[in-house]
């Protein structure tokens, strides 16, 4: 199985801050990576696919980059509604796997 | 707009079989290259992919669960079913169904709200 390791696992930031989350894959996955946002009690929501493509309707302050084994999700200016947990997922091979999550707290 | 809704018993006894249904509305199960996935999430923990099915019945399963899992589809009812046998407390989780677009778009773009299943005697 491909393991995805996210860092950090938790972060606290202020409104307006630039936030970066990293996802590292245990082996190369090209650009077959997605980022999801999950709020408490809700289903995950697709934010970014193919490592860097913004899903329709997602604010442009979210961006993704990377290929191979290292990927990043960046929120350019953190908003109060961005309080959530973020997960990366690889779709390069089976079984599909997720990172352990990064919880973003608003200071 | 595609909508997915999970349903099923909220409580399952240990060693029994967990059975859930995902009903799709706003679109056809058989249209395009769509696959229908099950994912679960224990309370306070991360996401685990269980498996997926195509309208034809073709499946992919997580090897860690494959011996206990069956995913099936009833296109006429627009339903996808999950059966997980020999459950233990470790199978207690919120279970989600979600759609991916197959080879062209293997990402989970539509999700159900999730349903909590507790395994307890």
Image (cartoon, coloured by chain):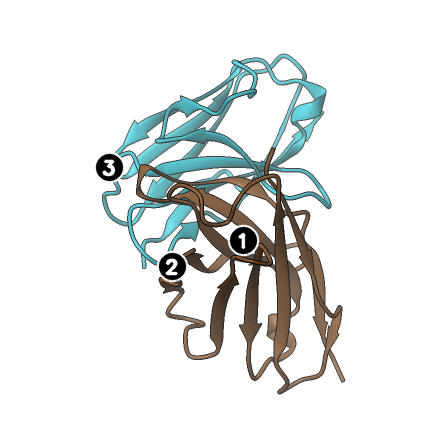
Nearer mark to the viewer, of 3 and 2: 2
Q: Which residue matches tag 3?
A: A30
The residue drawn where x is 44% and y is 58% is B52
Q: Label 1 lies in what chain?
A: B
Chain letter, colour brown in render? B
The lab-note entry on whether marks 3 and 2 share a chain reads: no
Q: Which residue matches tag 1?
A: B47
Query: Residue A93 appears at what percent x and percent y?
Result: 29, 52
The residue drawn where x is 42% and y is 36% is A34
Query: Residue B13 appears at what percent x and percent y?
Result: 71, 83
Q: Which residue matches tag 2?
A: B56
Query: Residue B60 appears at what percent x and percent y?
Result: 37, 62
Toward the viewer: B3 or A65? B3
Q: Label 2 lies in what chain?
A: B
Palette colour of chain A: cyan
Q: Determine whether A47 is above or below B58 in the image.
A: above
Q: Is mark 2 on a helix, strand or loop?
A: loop
- Taking the view exactly as shown, the residue that stands out farthest to the front is B76
Q: Determine whether A71 is above or below B116 in the image.
A: above
Gap between marks 3 and 2 measured at Cα: 29 Å
Instruction: Residue B95: give its label.
Output: none
């Amino acid at each position: 199985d491909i393991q995805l390791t996210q860092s950090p696992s938790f972060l606290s930031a202020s409104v307006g801050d630039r936030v970066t989350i990293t996802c590292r894959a245990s082996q190369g996955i090209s650009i077959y990576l997605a980022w999801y946002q999950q709020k408490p009690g809700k289903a995950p929501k697709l934010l970014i696919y193919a490592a860097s493509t913004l899903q329709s309707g997602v604010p442009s302050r979210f961006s993704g980059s990377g290929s191979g084994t290292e990927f990043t999700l960046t929120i350019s200016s953190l908003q109060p509604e961005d309080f959530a947990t973020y997960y990366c997922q690889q779709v390069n091979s089976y079984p599909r796997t997720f990172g352990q999550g990064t919880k973003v707290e608003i200071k | 707009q595609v909508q997915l809704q999970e349903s099923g018993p909220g409580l399952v006894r240990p060693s029994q079989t967990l059975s859930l249904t995902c009903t799709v509305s706003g679109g056809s199960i058989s249209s395009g290259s769509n696959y229908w996935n099950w994912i679960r999430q224990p309370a306070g923990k991360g996401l685990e992919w269980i498996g997926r099915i195509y309208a034809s019945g073709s499946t992919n399963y997580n090897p860690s669960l494959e011996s206990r899992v069956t995913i099936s589809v009833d296109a006429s009812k627009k339903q996808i079913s999950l059966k997980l046998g020999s459950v233990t407390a470790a199978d207690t989780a919120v279970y989600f169904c979600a759609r991916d677009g197959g080879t062209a778009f293997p990402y989970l773009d539509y999700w159900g709200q999730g349903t909590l299943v507790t395994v307890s005697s």
